[in-house]
Image (cartoon, helix red, strand yellow):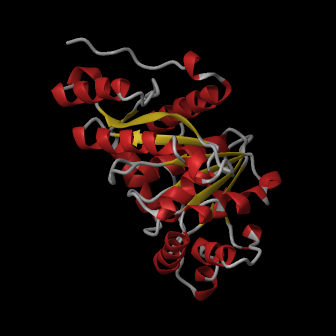
Amino acid sequence: MKIIAIATQKGGVGKTSSTVNIGAALALAGQRVLVVDLDPQAQAGSALGLNLSSQDQLARSLGWVIQAGLQGMRADLSAVWFDRSELVAGFEGAGTLHLLASEESTMTAAQDLIHKAGYPATPVLRRMLMDVADAFDFVVIDTPPAVSSMAATALAAADYVLTVCVPEYPALKGAAATRGTVRYVKGRTDGECDPVYLGAIVNRSNPPSKWRAQEVDTRNGMLDADLAPFPADIRLDNRISDSFAFGVPAVVRFAGHAPGRMYGELMCQVLTRMRQPQADWDTPARIVA
């Protein structure tokens, strides 16, 4: 089982859409996938067609499970995850897609407990996931868009970290800060957690014919900051954001169209980098005006 956290300190750049579409792309490719929604806003759950509303559903919030784990109780993740495999069931050779869903009040309480306990508490999620390692091939974690104890918990849980950057100046700073934070996880967890930074997703980009100075500067800035952007951009496409309203990831709704092709290509590049040393990673060339 490989655990991927998708993180950035800048909100509104498409972190959740990246999480659910990469997770769904892996499921379409035949993998057993678990999406973990660590954001109290619970957007990943909505994007997969699930909003915790009934009392029975609220009792399955990941926030409760994390709180239990922090208090020394053994948590059974298999009792609380939701099977969303129906979203990919119509595709030949598809794998499975499950969700650990969140809810604001319980996740906020869990975040407060982690904050009070400090860095020794951040491996709590990784330990829980290791207990179910035989059930999944990939775990993809959506994280809060801020510096927080819950974001630190996501990084501690991960084997690999991806960041997301739109071609705008403020997003570059947030992605670079996330890149730097990954370096400190091993030391802060006394070596228990050691995520590998895997690269930056360029999201909501324009075709080269429409690039302006800000987009060119941001792309070159990603190279200067050692963010290792993937060659496959996710182009600006309203079908990706519109898919949230349907509770079906764009890579599934538009599998044979541009969103499906873009996320499919990105998924392949992510898997390739997992197998390669960083020196062999393929990155875009610097843009010369």
Residue 257 vs 151, above or below: the answer is above
Q: Quadrant of the C terminus?
A: top left
Q: Residue 266, image x and y in percent?
A: 52, 32
Task: Kindly identify the residue that appears in the image at 30 percent across and 23 percent down.
Answer: 220
Quadrant of the rendered structure where residue 34 is?
bottom right
Q: Residue furthest right?
A: 134
Q: Residue 139, image x and y in percent?
A: 65, 50
Task: Kindly identify the residue that appears in the image at 74 percent across and 73 percent down.
Answer: 75
31 relative position to 217: left or right: right
Residue 108 vs 13, above or below: the answer is below
Nearest the eye: 162 or 224:
224
Q: Residue 148, image x and y in percent?
A: 43, 62
Q: Residue furthest bottom?
A: 55
Nearest the eye: 41 or 241:
41
Residue 279 vs 32, above or below: the answer is above
99 relative position to 169: left or right: right
Residue 247 seen in the current view: no
Q: Residue 170, image x and y in percent?
A: 24, 43
Residue 233 seen in the current view: yes
Q: Residue furthest top?
A: 288
